[in-house]
Image: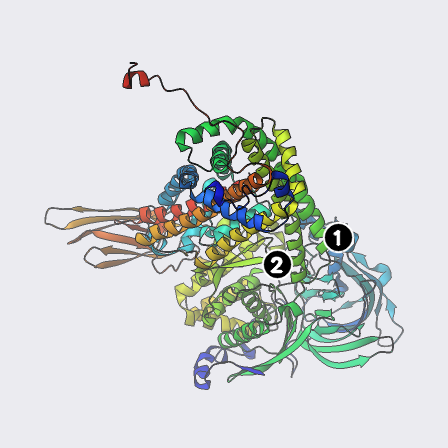
Amino acid sequence: VTRESWPYAGRRDRQSRLTDRRPGIIYAAWRNGWQRVLSSPAIVAGVLAMTLVLALPLALTMRGLLQEHLGGSLMAHEAADAVNYDWWQEFTSQTAGLGATFSPTIIGFASTLDAISGLMDRQSRIVPVAAAIAMYLAGWTFLVGGILDRYSRQRPTRARGFFAACGIYVVRFVRLALAAGVVYWWLFTYVHPWLFADLYPAVTRSVSVERTAFVWRLVFYAIFGTVLLSVNVLFDYAKIRTVVEDRRSMIAALAAALRFIARCPGRVTGLYVLNSTMLLAVIAIWALVAPGARGAGLSMWLTLAAGQVYLLARLVLKLHFLASQTALFQASLAHARYTAAPEPVWPESPAVETVRPAP
Amino acid sequence: VQIRVVAMACVCTLTIGPWTGVRGEQERPPSVQSFDHRDPGALSPRNAGYDIDVRLDHGRRRLDGRQTIRWRNISAYETDELRLQLYWNAWRDLDSTWLRGHRRSRGTLPTRPEHFSAIDVSAIRLRAPDGPPVNLMADARHIAPDDGNDADRTVMAVPLPFVVRPHDTVEVDVEWTAQIPAPFTRIRVGWIGDYYFIAHWFPRIGVLEDGGWKAHQFHAHTEFYADYGEFDVRITAPRPFVVAASGRETERTDNPDGTVTHRYQGQDIADVAWTASPHFIDLRRTFEHPALPRVEMRLVLQPEHRGQQERHFSATAAALRYFGEWFGPYPYDHLTIVDPAYQSGSQGMEYPTLFTAGTRWLAPRSVSVPESVTIHEVGHQFWHGVVGTNEVEHAWMDEGLTAYAGARVIEEMGLPNRLGMRYFGGFVPWVLRDIRLQRATDGNSLARYREAPNADTPATPTWQYWPTTATVITYSKTALWLHTLERHIGWPMMRQILATYFDRWKFRHPQPDDFFDIANEVSGQDLTWFFDQVYRGSSVFDYGVQELSSERIADGHHRTTVVVQRIGEGVFPVEVVTTFADGVQVRERWDGVDRRIVYEYDQPSPASTVQVDPERVLLLDVNYTNNSRTLEPRAREASLKWSLRWMVWLQELMLTYGFFL
């Protein structure tokens, strides 16, 4: 994207942009976010690859468990060609730990429902799965500095620059992640039980109509979800301000993020709602097209590909959240494509002397 | 509108044959009550009749009742006391036997005052033919014949001033009040909002057998046992309430105080349950069948389930049809289906001529809810309602039999019967269209049985089962062994057994051996070896292939060695089928007694597969994966396919949780 293509660039001063309440800026940030994401496909591919790398060892372990249980049995034929639910139940009854997570919920869209519902209902995950998720979060914490640096600069930083930025911000973002962890821990340890184990049962104790109870449940999901998303927005902008303004103090970054959100809540919320709508649309489409249990062979690989395409779409949208929020922030409080931190320049490797001797 | 079951008259003449051809009244085997004969024109001995006046105090959530019990001793036992069941005292305090058992099973305990209930008897008067009533209240006392729990008040012994001999009749008037509980778990009675479900609610007389009283305390995982009689119940409730009860409504009286008295009468039933709510949608259909009696089906439906009425009616009609064709006709001309209110804890329970179904607001058509629970509860109209088993001591005789037969009806109906998962607090359903539930495994709950196959010996009285695993033995194990028996002797024979059992024991109280005797007699086989294992023992069945190998021998043939192993303690004859690469099959019959058996074959081709029990007769086998072996296994393919699926699930979990960081 060129500076000229940014609709607000050069037209107004920073203050006027900040107070501009036209909805157009939301759309512009949203559109610009797409440009930033799509111009850096390596980031998308890299993060998706990280999920694969982290999931693969456990998947291989699971494969070993399944293969060992099936052994030379004819039960494998039906399991390979379709679903052998009888064998499935037999396997889960005879296994514990990782094997116990092999539930029919992994089929098709049920997988998505399980993930979201499990989060909203505070479903605990077994240690290996929780560990894989934790490793992903750690990896993400490392990468997000480079991702935001790339999105804020809006030009290729190449692998060297990308990972250098990751290195620059990782300690700061670990501190920020710890703060986020404390907040999420408090939300899930105290707020969630208070809402869903105390308040919800109290409110629905005498409800004799399921539809009414469901509406109450949705209200509580909305409350908890709003809190979660608000925290998410706050930490997103804290990360963005950390990178764009080269902030060292994460407390100051959080305060600055809060100030930004407080000064233009409409834009922040509008953009978040727009992005969330996109995410919901992708999930809805997946609900319609998610493949069921198919056979082995080509069908299996096509199903895997479909799953990866869906995950890719989810990931792109997550990255678009960050990119569009960066665009919004830069359009509001910073020059477009401006980052306070200098582009990291690293000294050459000593090997260069061998490759290119001094004249 | 009438539901006309699709069955041609000529077909029914054939299909209903078994119960028309069985032996009749004159060949009744002896029972636990020596004089349980039916009076002319009656279906049952009618020895325990009740006239009850009850008023629902909606504001105070209370019942005020007065009743007359007319009881005739049809046993050979002489007694000088009556025993009354006061079930609602089970939730009187935390020390009741019910709540002690419930605590052992780690169930939810009552925490709020409205969760507790009580039934207090204020007067018991014996009607004397030639004098004033005799007050029996002074000497009445609570007893605990099962566990000696002094705090339990669910059984009351009422001494009489004389001995009641066989054929003698006594009449007592009882006055009582009962506090209606709010459900804290699935206690199956109580109120929520302005919905009431009232069951096992009045002082009910126990069953006197030749060996003495059978009036057990109320236990957390057992149900009921009662004699048959005539009921005349007048229920007074606020005018807006729709009231539905066991029996037929014969009279309705508007009272000046804004209440309505509903009179329900029923004959040859052992209990009365009722429900009341101002919100019910009151619907009726007629079940008609060329060879079965007409039945008026009444459905009182929750408004939020409007649109599911046909699912309730069609499941009920199908159950009436199949059970009627297989076992014998439903003997009453009415049946009430109650759609319980959400969170009422009253779903899925059977009472004479009335049962509670159970559904959800979002209930996908391809998932068999409410059909499965509806069919199960209709099944109980036959097994427990008509064949009056003792649910406290032998719950398997009705629950297990109904689970087995209900699964068969679902299969016959051809329902889609897909696996449904529920998310977001259980409110949001999702149908897994790739998984169709199977009668043999899912219908009989094999997965649940596998969790604790030897938790208890079924011959143990049910009230003594370990609470957390009681249902595994009562429902799942019984359904599985009955289905195993069906596959072993064939469905026509099984049907003949059940029809004979139904005919001989309708409106009586059979014992387990009565069922086993009929099975042996009708099948013409001594099946004691089977019943010893599945009923009197807790053996686990598991047969498996230990080895399959084929090697070339001198003359160009292949020597195939098959080793089959009995891994579990249970013994059952099984077939062993070895298939060779050229398609040749060798079928062996193994008595399954030894720990293993070795078969060797010299064949032109090497072996391809071996299967133990390929028809899966032995449904109690807890590990069927080891029942087969192939020399061309596809475990690698299957495990790769499913582990990739699982990997995508894990990746999505990562993205979902990572979204917030």
- Residue under the image location 40 percent in, 31 percent down: A159
Q: Position of residue A272 (x, y in %)?
A: 58, 47
Q: Nearer the viewer, residue B156 or B159?
A: B156
Which quarter of the figure has residue B233? bottom right
Question: Which residue type carries mark 2?
Answer: Glu
Quadrant of the frame with the N terminus of chain B: bottom right
Residue A271 drawn at (x, y percent): 58, 48
Task: Give the labeled residue for mark 2.
Answer: B393
The secondary structure type at the circle numbered 1 is loop
* Separation of residues labelled 1 and 2 (CA atoms): 19 Å
Q: Quadrant of the C terminus of chain B?
A: top right
- Nearer the N terminus, badge 1 or badge 2? 1
Q: Crowding near pointer 2: few (<14 within 10 Å), some, many (20+)?
A: many
Chain letter of the residue carrying label 2? B
Amino acid carrying label 1: it is: Asp
Residue B131 at least partly seen: yes
Using the image, tell me which numbered label, if any, was put on residue A276. Answer: none
Residue shown at 56% from the left, 51% from the top: A274
Residue A190 versus residue A217 in the image, above or below:
above
The label nearer to you, 1 versus 2, is: 1
**Would you say B47 lies left or right of A355 here?**
right
User: Which residue occupies the extreme top position in the image?
Assistant: A359
Instruction: Identify which residue, B297 or B462, lies in the foreground.
Output: B297
Q: For mark 1, what is the residue? A: B152
Q: Is residue A219 above or below residue B174?
A: above
User: In the figure, B310 relative to B528: above or below?
Assistant: below
